[in-house]
Image (tube, grey):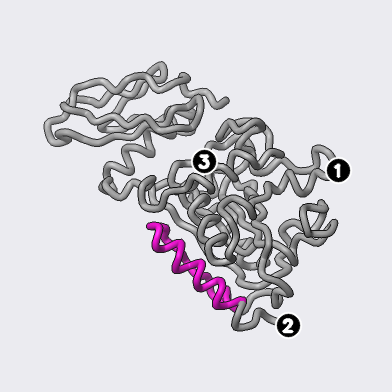
Amino acid sequence: MPPDSADQDRARLIVVEARSYGIQVFEQAGCYTARDRWLRVPQYIVDHHDASTLASGEWGSLGYIVRERISNWQVARGLDGVPKVALVAAGANCPHAGVGGPWGACPRDSMNGWGYGVEKAGTTGERYTPAALYATKGLYHAIEVVCGRPPGSMVVEHAEWGNIGRAGRKNDSDYGKGGTPNGGPGGNGNWMRQQVRDFQPNTEGDDDMTPDQASQLLWVYNRLVGLTGKDHPHYVVKDGVARQVAQSETGALPVKLLNTLDGNYIINRIDSASKAVPAVGATGERS
């Protein structure tokens, strides 16, 4: 049976809640009637990556995910600095995490009927952008609000679920064991669960940035993690230091640079177009 009105209303409420946090939500065609009726209010959120490379762009494997309805939600890469998610299927039994467990109340090999699947555009070793992390945390928070669960309580990494009794089978999402964001193998969801508990809507986004500033930020970010080699008219990057090239038209520009060691942002307010931005960590190598 397709999703019933309660399933559809739940998904619509999640969309409304996520949008209230400043997240753009794209409702894919047929999303409210896709897959099966939930036999229970979803109890879990399984945190995946879609294993797409950066060459696949902003939405990664979204086309395939929508065509096959293999997950309920997809998080974009946020390459433009804008947090974005897509609703793929409101119903149960998307085949995102059938093998694994048990976990809590969910019996072994049964997660597809117990929890939403959320794919993030990205793959092992790729750093998630701040926009993608904000969208992920915000979506999970919105789901838990609508489902009436405490913040962070529903989140399960795919590796946590899938590796029970089958060690090493899955590695997503690879925020890192022991709580180090954006580095290391998956299998420990404590960091993301804490991120969702600490989530503060509308305080972590880049709404004050113009599209051009977001483009400049993206270029610096990509250079620092070794993803591009092109020069940018406003910045040069050398030895992990970003310096703004003196250009009279830029004026005082707010710039947010990624600390490549721990994934946190250092906010720098540039007082003049020729002032250097302090070093922010490594020399462009991914940890």
State which region is magenta.
Answer: 7-32
Q: Which label is found at residue 1?
A: 2
* Residue designated by label 1: 166
Secondary structure at badge 1 equals loop
Q: Is residue 75 above or below residue 221?
A: below
Amino acid on which disc 3 is placed: Tyr
Q: Which label is found at residue 187?
A: none
* Dominant secondary structure, magenta: helix
Q: Residues within 10 Å of mark 3 (few under 14, many from 20)?
A: many
Indicate left or right for 53 with 281 as reference.
right
Q: Is residue 13 magenta?
A: yes
**Corner quadrant of residue 67:** bottom right
**Corner quadrant of residue 64:** bottom right
Which residue, as the protein is rendered here, is positioned at the far left?
Answer: 248
Looking at marks 1 and 2 on the same chain, the residue that comes earlier in the sequence is marked by 2
* Residue designated by label 3: 128
Residue drawn at point x = 57 percent, y = 37 percent: 126
Q: CA distance from mark 1 to mark 2?
A: 32 Å
Amino acid on which disc 1 is placed: Arg
Q: CA distance from mark 1 to mark 3?
A: 27 Å
| Labels 2, 3: front one | 2
